[in-house]
Amino acid sequence: MPDSTPERPHTALPTPDPRPVAPEPPLPSDCCESGCTVCVYDSYAEELDDYRLRLAAWKQRNPDAAD
């Protein structure tokens, strides 16, 4: 026997837009102090720059969000 309940229209759920999370800074012991071409501090600085850009964009999309 076919189901006689009417179909509910599909409603789009709001897309979550979570606040970006800052990267964890490296521990002093994470750097080997050998002058690596790409140091953990260099990687952290790049991640921090990216975080700041994503945070600024997020704040534009969410102007009422608390700082």
Image: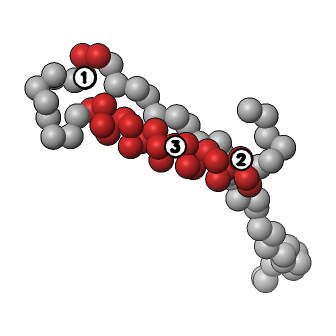
Residue 32 location (% of width, % of height): 16, 22
Write the residue at 22% across / 23% down.
Answer: 31
- Asked which secondary structure carries label 1, the reply is helix
As measured in the structure, the alpha-carbon distance from the residue carrying label 2 to the one carrying label 1 is: 32 Å
Crowdedness near tag 2: few (<14), some (14–19) or many (≥20) residues, C-alpha within 10 Å: some
Tag count in the figure?
A: 3
Q: Quadrant of residue 40?
A: top left
Q: Disc 1 marks which amino acid? A: Asp
Report if the CB atoms under discs 2 and 1 are less than 8 Å apart: no
Residue annotated with mark 1: 30
**Residue 34 as seen in the image, left or right of residue 62:** left
Q: Is residue 43 above or below residue 11?
A: above
* Distance of label 2 from label 3 (alpha carbons): 12 Å
Q: Residue at x 14, y 34 (%)?
A: 36
Position of 32 with respect to 26 (left or right) is left
Dots 2, 3 in contact, CB < 8 A: no
Crowding at mark 3 (Cα within 10 Å: few <14, some 14-19, many 20+): some
Q: In the picture shown, does residue 8 fall above or below 31?
A: below
Point out which mark residue 58 bears: none
**Residue furthest top in the image:** 29
SS category of the residue bearing label 3: helix
Q: Amino acid at mark 2?
A: Lys
The image shows residue 61 at horizontal and vertical percentages of 74, 55
Marked residue nearer the N-terminal end (2 or 3) = 3
Structural distance between the alpha carbons of marks 3 and 1 = 20 Å
Q: Is residue 65 left or right of residue 21?
A: right
| Residue for point 16% across, 22% down | 33
Can you identify the residue that label 3 sits on?
51
Q: What amino acid is found at the position of numbered circle 3 in the picture?
A: Tyr
Q: Residues within 10 Å of mark 1 (few under 14, many from 20)?
A: few
In the picture, which quadrant includes the N terminus?
bottom right
Q: State the residue position of label 2.
A: 59
